[in-house]
Image (cartoon, rainbow, N blue to C red):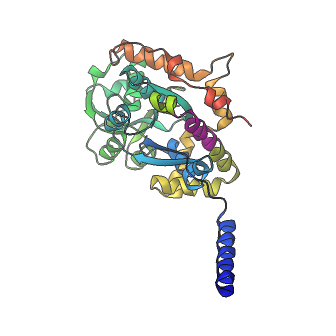
Amino acid sequence: MKKLSMLLTAVLVVVVSLVSLVGPVWAAQYSMIISLPTWTGYAPLFLAKEKGFFAKYGLDVELSVTQDLGPRQQAFAAKRVDALATAHDVQVQVAAAGIPLKIVWAFDDSCGGDGILAKPEIQTIQDLKGKQVAFLRGSTSHFLLLTALKSVGMTEKDITAVNMTAGDAGAAFVAGRVDAAVTWEPWLSQGSKSGGHVLVDTTDFPGVIGDSIAFHGDYVAKNPEAVQAFVKAMKDAMEYWHAHPEESNQIMASGMGITLDEFVATLEGLKLMDYQDNLAFFGTEGKAGPLYDVLQNAVNFYYDLKIIPAKVNVEDLVAPEFLWDAQD
């Protein structure tokens, strides 16, 4: 019996030692499924998961990667996923379709990370007239294209639209199957290397494109603590990125399935937003931030084009209190 007691004690010591080596283990209190496509701006989600920041706050997070917006929106509407990572303007379209949502975190601001690839002979936006332009209808790419066309007095009727995802559009351009493509990095760089050029990008239309995450309204109502935990985890993840950029970039590159060099290159046209950036973007209780203007511009734009049936109240789409309550 004494030997058995000594053996159990030894085993317990080993277990405790192993736990101290691997760090604290947190039990999951909440689960959530986040729908996202492959896009550099969402890469911090992989960082938060890999480094244990979600687990730290009791979250079991599944990152569901799907490229096509249609199936993602359907899954969100049916509550098969709890949160939707997408562009600000797409959040407006989703809300206008009658799906309750609350935006709680902004991932990025595009500073050249989205644009229109074109063949060498297409030197101006007006040169797109009659040309095959690949983009995903109802997406951020569509929003950017319509903004560019409107800036020179053109409409979608002036081009030959080819409907496909941003990634497929980039690949189609590189393969020479379309005259132009509305896409993002790394396709902008790849398309430029294959004989094309970037006709316009988001540096020509600042503030047009950025990305955020919205939770389904029902999920927020039932699990406000989980949403609060998510915001805190993202805050920690971005602080870790600032403190350990090389390690963080490698983790995020792996999550996206690209090389470290490719990932770093995509950051050149993108500003990843940390907690302080989010506070400024969402605003305070006394003064609304720029996010509200971005959303309102999208509402007006899509309503005027009859893409959404009615205008939505942008204040109903934003839940800034989770950011405010995440302060140290």
Q: Is residue 189 in sight in this rendering?
A: yes
Magenta segment: 223-235
Q: Please, is residue 184 above or below residue 317 in the view?
A: below
Q: Please, is residue 130 above or below residue 255 in the view?
A: above
> Closer to the camera, 114 or 24?
24
Residue 292 location (% of width, % of height): 55, 19
Quadrant into which the C terminus falls: top right
Question: In the rendered view, does 273 fall on the left or right side of 125?
Answer: right
Residue 213 location (% of width, % of height): 50, 34
> Closer to the camera, 2 or 169?
2
Residue 248 location (% of width, % of height): 60, 54
> Closer to the camera, 49 or 262?
49
In which quarter of the view is residue 77 placed?
A: top left
Residue 272 location (% of width, % of height): 59, 40
Main SS class of the magenta portion in the image = helix
Quadrant into which the N terminus falls: bottom right
